[in-house]
Image (cartoon, rainbow, N blue to C red):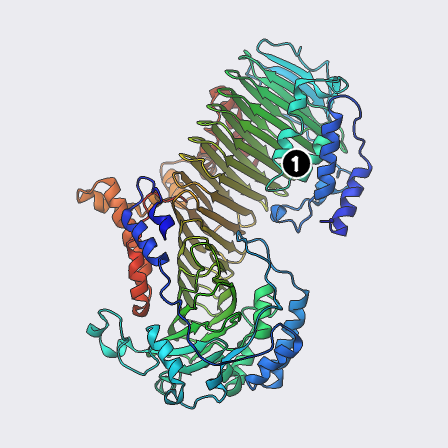
């Protein structure tokens, strides 16, 4: 079916300024992604999947400019020994990065390997993204596969001794960045990937994750605070038998964020947890869109999303659990909750279930409301000042999402960021 | 029903529930056909057909114009595709839009003059068109006080209303209950004021189609302060082959009034699917209350999914005044395809909307149903309880919207939707939309059976029941509450469903 004219024009305008990197193993999948994109077009506000979030500023040809914010907080994950890979406005910064050699993992850059004829990433690059395009279209991910300027290719063969930290520094007010990472975890391998920083004025990031049987991957990311930045990110994860994927995302402000996580449980007894905590103040729009497909027996999935909103901030949650025929003994859980700290903020949610197997336990819950007055009164009556009591209850509200981070030090880091946010607004 | 008999049922699902679903989805009891001569309008839909329907109903010019405007709009609209239902393309030109028994060419002046064949049809359906005190066939009805059991019936057969009972007695109370075609002629000021005011002409594809071609339906007006002295009901029967039924119901509950309205429907077994697109509009003024109950039992198609009714219905209640209250109760067991979202607009402060639904889909049935609760006024409350049961190869979807507008301060919503799958070839889906735009309102969407009232659970536990027993008791008690909210007249069909437990259900 031909695209509507307005969609066609908007897509062409966006593509006009982009150059598809030619040559090497990545060119064929990039061209296929471009074909996918041409067939679906970039989204507009009439698309059901963008019902709650306007994609205009992500589609327009030029990135809207974003002021730079002084970061006066201690570096995130500073207490954790880690291998740092730094991108400044999407450009790899060798001087600021650590040596990429680490036992149990091979780390390469997309831009450096793309010229080669053959690479392990060829079997995954754009492959998981393409799988994730049905039943719902994700045009920004196809755009990403086609035009990514760089990214890292991480092959986890063992158990690296420290987390790999992707640091995204934002220095230009008009930077428009597309990065694409591929992560492959071998059987028995286990690794942690940390991501932090605002990255760019407009950031389109895609991560494809393939976890073999019994492999484990932990992903903890923080998307930068107090910023005019805009971001559209995708994670496509495919899980083999008895494998584990745990992801947590902290979003502290940012004028527009759309985080899509697409998980496919293809091996029996796999476990996927996708969690997020977001705190928004003022002109802030944060959208978590999650799609979990159960296509094997005995798998467990959890989606835990908590949003604290004030001064007109908007929180969106679109979550889906799809249980395919035959995916018996599925345990699917999904919770999305918002705490609205004042009258102006909004919470928009669409928590969906689509189930084609009968021996499953799937549940979802979604709530929205203000701070519990009774709990507040209780704390006040114990002599806790109002602000402190509110902050305490807010942190308690977010705790279920933060608890999804396995590593206690990383979780403490995230809590410190949340406390910082609360303190700045008290 | 062989398929269901052989189905392996997962542990934890009550055999009683399986039996009840089998009973409900078993041999369709109303699939017979009345041999009666019928006048049809020419096949297809054109402006002339719209004019013809209007002239058959002896409508004033403004009504004809209203229909023609709707028809013009319909031509510009596209059929909605978002529901999780899959059916072959409908050829809107391959249908009859008007079918009337020949004997109804002259409208009978009283029920005594109605064609005995038609009367016999309703008799056979268990809806005798007699002004009798007790409903025949309703077990236990005899023991109830006679006046409490009176039910006025408007019987719609294909495109026309056959007759309405108890009109005189209702008139004494000031209640107007008649067919919509009669209301257009006799009470044009009321119809003109309210028709299309809740479901606008161009609301959606099917509502627009209905606005153009509706042939009959029921009209209710309850004046201020009047408690309608009896239950009102409409019974819709599709009989003619290859004919769509498009009925329009308009209920107005003026200030401080109360009315309970029931709706039932059946159709003969036909190999070819038939279209039914209805619109129901309810206006609830200050302090008024309306209960609207439906047992939808259109022919669901055979066990291979052949035939059945495509049921595309727009139902909406507008709580215009403060403290207005509306309650939708539906038991959906029929239709090959159901597309139906009875909704509440809670405009008045302190107004309340409730939606209780049990949807059972078997064989190749597909149901996409739910509700919308639009909170506009302060302190408004809504409650949604939806139980979906799928068996065979059926697909059952709950789709709903809860919207709290910025000015709807201190409002509350509680939603519970549970699904139960019987067998591994069917599907159960939940698609709720939640939009909260103020912080003093509380919205809760729950979908687990363990979230039953903690106090009730505690009470049961303190009496020595174990956790499981207590949950079962509370949940079943709750389900019975929903069913008991149904008026007596639907009790027989509803009783079969009481056995349905929600153990082993998924949210």
Q: Quadrant of residue A298?
A: top left
Name the spot of residue B335 as percent of width and height, x first: 45, 61
Q: Nearer the viewer, residue B283 or B130?
A: B130
Residue A99 higher or lower than A277, as above or below: above
Name the spot of residue A327 as percent of width and height, x first: 45, 35
Residue A424 located left or right of residue A113? left
Residue B474 higher or lower than A61, as above or below: below
Q: Which residue is mark 1?
A: A232
Q: Secondary structure at mark 1?
A: strand
Name the residue located 45 percent from the left edge and 60 percent from the top edge: B301
Q: Nearer the viewer, residue A315 or A417?
A: A315
Name the residue located 47 percent from the left edge and 31 percent from the top edge: A296
Residue A387 higher or lower than B38, as above or below: above
Q: Does residue B227 appear in this view? A: no
Residue A17 located left or right of residue A311? right
Instruction: Report in which chain the residue with disc 1 lies.
Output: A
Task: Count residues near mark 1 (Cα–Cα under 10 Å), then give few for <14, some for 14-19, many for 20+.
Answer: many
Name the spot of residue B78 as percent of width and height, x first: 64, 61
Residue A350 higher or lower than A223, as above or below: below
Q: How many marks?
A: 1
């Amino acid at each position: 079916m031909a695209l509507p004219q307005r969609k066609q024009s908007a897509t062409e305008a966006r593509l006009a300024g982009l150059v598809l990197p030619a040559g090497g193993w990545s060119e064929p999948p990039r061209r296929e992604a471009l074909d996918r994109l041409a067939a679906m077009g970039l989204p507009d506000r009439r698309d059901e999947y963008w019902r709650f979030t306007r994609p205009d500023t992500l589609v327009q040809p030029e990135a809207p400019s974003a002021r730079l914010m002084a970061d006066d907080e201690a570096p995130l994950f500073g207490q954790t020994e880690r291998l740092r890979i730094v991108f400044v406005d999407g450009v790899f910064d060798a001087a600021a990065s650590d040596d990429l050699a680490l036992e149990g993992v091979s780390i390469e850059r997309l831009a450096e390997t793309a010229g080669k004829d053959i690479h392990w990433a060829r079997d995954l690059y754009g492959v998981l993204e393409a799988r994730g395009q049905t039943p719902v279209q994700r045009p920004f991910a196809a755009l990403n596969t086609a035009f990514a300027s760089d990214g890292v290719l991480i092959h986890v063969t063992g158990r690296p001794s420290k987390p790999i930290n992707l640091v995204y520094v934002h220095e230009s007010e008009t930077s428009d960045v597309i990065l694409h990472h591929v992560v492959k975890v071998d059987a028995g391998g286990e690794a942690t990937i940390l991501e932090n920083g605002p990255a760019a004025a407009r950031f389109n990031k895609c991560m494809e994750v393939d976890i073999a049987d019994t492999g484990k991957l932990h992903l903890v990311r923080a998307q930068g605070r107090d910023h005019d930045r805009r971001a559209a990110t995708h994670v496509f994860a495919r899980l083999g038998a008895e494998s584990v994927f745990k992801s947590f995302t902290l979003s502290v402000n940012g004028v527009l964020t759309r985080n899509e996580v697409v998980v496919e449980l293809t091996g029996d007894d796999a476990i996927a947890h996708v969690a997020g905590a977001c705190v928004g103040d003022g002109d802030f729009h944060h959208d978590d869109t999650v799609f979990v497909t159960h296509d094997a027996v005995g798998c467990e999935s959890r989606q835990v999303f908590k949003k604290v909103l004030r001064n007109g901030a908007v929180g969106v949650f679109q979550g889906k659990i799809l249980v395919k025929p035959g995916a018996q003994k599925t345990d699917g859980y999904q919770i999305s909750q918002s705490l609205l700290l004042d009258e102006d903020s909004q919470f928009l949610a669409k928590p969906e279930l689509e189930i084609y197997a009968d021996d499953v336990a799937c549940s979802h819950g979604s709530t929205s409301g203000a701070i519990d007055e009774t709990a507040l009164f209780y704390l006040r009556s114990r002599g806790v000042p109002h602000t402190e009591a509110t902050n305490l209850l807010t942190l308690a509200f977010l705790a279920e999402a933060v608890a999804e981070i396995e590593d206690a030090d990383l979780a403490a880091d995230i809590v410190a960021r949340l406390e910082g946010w609360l303190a700045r607004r008290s | 029903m062989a398929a269901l008999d052989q189905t392996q049922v997962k542990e934890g699902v009550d055999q009683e529930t399986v039996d009840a679903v089998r009973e409900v989805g078993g041999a369709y009891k109303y699939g017979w056909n009345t041999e009666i001569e019928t006048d049809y309008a020419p096949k297809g839909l054109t402006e002339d057909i719209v004019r013809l329907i209007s002239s058959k109903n002896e409508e004033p010019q403004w009504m004809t114009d209203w229909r023609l405007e709707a028809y013009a709009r319909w031509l510009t609209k596209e059929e909605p595709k978002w529901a999780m239902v899959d059916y072959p393309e409908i050829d809107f030109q391959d249908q009859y839009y008007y079918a009337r028994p020949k004997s109804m060419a002259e409208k009978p002046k009283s029920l005594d003059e109605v064609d005995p064949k038609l009367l016999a049809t309703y008799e056979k359906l268990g809806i005798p068109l007699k002004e009798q005190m007790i409903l025949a066939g309703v077990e236990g009805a005899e023991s109830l006080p006679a006046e409490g059991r009176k039910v006025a019936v408007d019987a719609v057969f294909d495109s026309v209303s056959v007759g309405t009972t108890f009109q005189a007695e209702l008139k004494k109370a000031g209640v107007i209950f008649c067919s919509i075609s009669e209301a257009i002629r006799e009470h044009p000021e009321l119809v003109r004021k309210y028709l299309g005011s809740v479901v606008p002409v161009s609301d959606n594809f099917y509502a627009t189609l209905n606005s153009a071609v509706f042939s009959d339906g029921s009209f209710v007006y309850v004046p201020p302060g009047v408690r309608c002295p009896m239950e009102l009901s409409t019974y819709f029967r599709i009989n003619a082959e290859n004919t769509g039924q498009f009925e329009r119901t308009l209920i107005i509950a003026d200030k401080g009034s109360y009315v309970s309205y029931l709706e039932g429907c059946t159709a003969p077994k036909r190999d070819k699917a038939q279209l039914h697109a209805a619109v129901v509009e309810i206006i609830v003024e200050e302090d008024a209350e309306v209960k609207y109950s439906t047992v939808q039992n259109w022919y669901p198609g055979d066990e291979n999914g052949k035939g059945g009714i495509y049921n595309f219905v727009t139902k909406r209640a507008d709580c215009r005044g403060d403290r207005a209250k509306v309650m939708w109760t539906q038991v959906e067991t029929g239709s090959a395809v159901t597309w139906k979202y009875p909704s509440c607009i809670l405009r008045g402060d302190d107004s309340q909307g409730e939606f209780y639904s049990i949807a059972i889909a078997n064989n190749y049935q597909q149901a996409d149903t739910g509700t919308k609760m639009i909170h506009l006024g302060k302190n408004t409350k809504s409650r949604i309880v939806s139980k979906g049961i799928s068996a065979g190869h059926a697909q059952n979807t709950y789709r709903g919207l809860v919207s709290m507008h910025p000015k709807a301060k201190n409002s509350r919503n509680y939603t519970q939707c549970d699904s139960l799958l019987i067998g591994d070839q069917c599907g159960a889906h939940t698609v709720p939309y939640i939009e909260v735009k103020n912080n003093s309102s509380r919205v809760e969407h729950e979908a687990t059976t363990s979230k039953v009232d903690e106090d009730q659970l505690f009470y049961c536990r303190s009496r020595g029941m174990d956790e499981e027993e207590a949950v079962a008791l509370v949940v079943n008690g709750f389900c019975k509450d929903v069913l008991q909210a149904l008026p007596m007249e639907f009790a027989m069909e509803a009783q079969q469903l009481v056995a349905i437990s929600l153990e082993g259900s998924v949210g």
